[in-house]
């Protein structure tokens, strides 16, 4: 607080107001927002009172304010991808008595057409961005796309903000359909490699006989190297999906790249230096594969130091309402049916389902029922038959104690609301006040 008094007395506030454009934000040394103007809040669709005190990365997607403070250097006219488009932003650390006590950020150009005309340097930057985005536009995710209130998701998001600035390899494990690619792209988006390529390679979809040259490249007869995925990711990130499918014979070669940062194309002994950050995913436990001699132990220990375990949807069912709302908003716009909502009984059925296909299955179901819904309400009768016939079950083994209690509370409230419409009577039966009952109904989206 004492430093912030110095900050205010030093006239920095007036400097911000004089140099700020329409959107600006100020954060403290912990990257928590202490001020954000109304114009910015309106664009972000957040309430200023709720934004104050939150980590800036939780409010502004792809924010690098915290990284600017770590590096201690300003970023001027830096491309910032936000809400589907690129803008130009200034990010400046605030220094008092030689100590960084916060940072100030402003959006200086909000329309690509305006800043595209500025200079050849900016035009070159934008061409690079557009080329990159065109390659991955259909599936690119960012940190803000990670939805959920469960303890497991909160911990993963905290880990991502910590590990993203590093160059260390990251292993992401989780069942199929849990969204491992989204977490990988979020790490890339928060890193200082965000303006470089994010290259993907799925070991399960490429024929085994072609994998080596696809990953490491190939030395052709005319002594020209055909670049593999590693070289294509130069300066950026290579995301190797389903690393558990990589043949043992190639695992040693990948380990050498990780250790030496040099790649040896197929057909030559020549090594080429590379600067690549590796993120790898697996839908099975690599530790078990190592025990069964199906995966190299030395490669496993090289990549497992930072491991994100993505829980299946059935183990974080409290995240379902937010996920449903997010996907409904997206798919209803795509279908030209704005304002689609889901009624309480339909939501309850979705919450009782086990979701063996995880978030991917949820997305597919919601895309379908939006088209089947009559009017603006999704009711039970449009849900797939196997979900409607799902018997309510409760597994005491799913999740932490906090998550288990959350599920129990939701089920008790649902049962009472099905049997009784008078909220006062329900509150009396449960021994709580009516206001507390309404708070719990709102918390569980019942």
Image (spheres, rainbow, N blue to C red):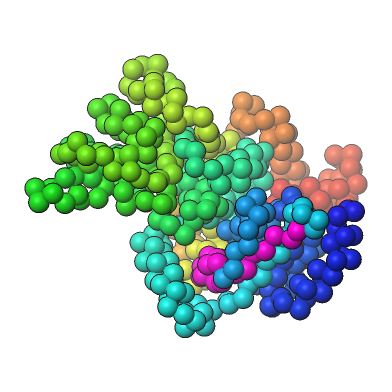
Eyeballing the image, is 24 above or below 30? below
Eyeballing the image, is 290 above or below 175? above
Eyeballing the image, is 296 above or below 216? above
Horizontal side of residue 169 vs 161, given as left or right = left
Horizontal side of residue 244 vs 351, given as left or right = left
Residue at 60% across, 33% down: 393
Front residue (pair 433, 175):
175
Residue 375's image quarter? bottom right
**Stretch of the chain drawn in magenta:** 78-95
**What x and y, as percent, mark residue 336?**
49, 73
Question: Tag count in the figure?
Answer: 0
Residue 134's image quarter? bottom left
**What x and y, as percent, mark residue 111?**
54, 79
Horizontal side of residue 26 vs 116, given as left or right = right
Say whether residue 300 is visible.
yes
Front residue (pair 165, 408):
165
**What x and y, as percent, mark residue 242?**
36, 37
Type of secondary structure dominating the magenta stretch:
strand
**What x and y, as percent, mark residue 63?**
61, 59
Residue at 33% across, 17% down: 293
Residue 377's image quarter? bottom right
Residue at 40% across, 16% down: 291
Front residue (pair 105, 408):
105
Say whether residue 412 is visible.
no
Direction left: furthest residue: 221
Residue at 58% across, 76% down: 110
């Amino acid at each position: 607080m004492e430093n912030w008094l110095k900050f205010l007395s030093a006239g920095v506030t007036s400097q911000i107001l004089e140099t700020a454009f329409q959107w600006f934000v100020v954060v403290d040394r912990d990257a928590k927002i202490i001020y954000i103007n109304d114009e910015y809040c309106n664009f972000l669709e957040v309430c200023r009172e709720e934004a104050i005190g939150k980590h800036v990365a939780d409010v502004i997607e792809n924010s690098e304010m915290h990284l600017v403070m770590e590096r201690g250097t300003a970023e001027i006219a830096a491309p910032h991808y936000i809400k589907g488009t690129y803008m130009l932003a200034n990010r400046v650390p605030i220094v008092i008595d030689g100590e960084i006590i916060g940072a100030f950020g402003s959006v200086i150009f909000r329309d690509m057409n305006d800043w595209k005309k500025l200079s050849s340097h900016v035009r070159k930057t934008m061409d690079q961005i557009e080329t990159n985005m065109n390659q991955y536009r259909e599936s690119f995710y960012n940190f803000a796309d990670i939805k959920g209130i469960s303890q497991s998701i909160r911990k993963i998001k905290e880990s991502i903000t910590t590990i993203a600035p590093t160059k260390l390899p990251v292993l992401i494990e989780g069942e199929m359909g849990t969204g491992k690619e989204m977490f990988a792209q979020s790490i890339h988006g928060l890193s200082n490699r965000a303006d470089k390529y994010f290259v993907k390679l799925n070991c399960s979809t490429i024929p085994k006989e072609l994998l080596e040259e696809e990953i490491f490249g190939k030395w052709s007869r005319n002594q020209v190297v055909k670049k593999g995925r590693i070289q294509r990711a130069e300066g950026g990130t290579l995301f190797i999906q389903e690393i558990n499918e990589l043949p043992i014979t190639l695992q040693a070669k990948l380990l050498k790249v990780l250790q030496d940062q040099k790649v040896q194309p197929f057909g030559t002994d020549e090594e080429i230096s590379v600067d690549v950050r590796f993120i790898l995913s697996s839908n099975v436990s690599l530790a078990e594969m190592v025990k069964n001699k199906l995966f190299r132990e030395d490669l496993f220990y090289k990549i497992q130091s930072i491991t994100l375990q993505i829980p299946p949807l059935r183990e974080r069912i409290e995240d379902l309402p937010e996920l449903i709302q997010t996907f409904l908003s997206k798919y209803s716009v795509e279908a030209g049916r704005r304002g689609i909502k889901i009624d309480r009984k339909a939501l309850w059925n979705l919450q009782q389902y086990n979701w063996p296909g995880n978030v991917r299955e949820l997305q597919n179901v919601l895309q379908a029922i939006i088209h089947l819904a009559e009017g603006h309400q999704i009711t039970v009768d449009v849900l797939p038959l196997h979900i409607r016939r799902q018997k309510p079950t409760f597994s005491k083994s799913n999740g932490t104690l906090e998550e288990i209690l959350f599920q129990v509370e939701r089920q008790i409230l649902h049962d009472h609301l099905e049997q009784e419409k008078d909220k006062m009577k329900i509150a009396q039966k449960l021994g709580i006040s009516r206001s507390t009952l309404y708070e719990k109904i709102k918390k569980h989206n019942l």
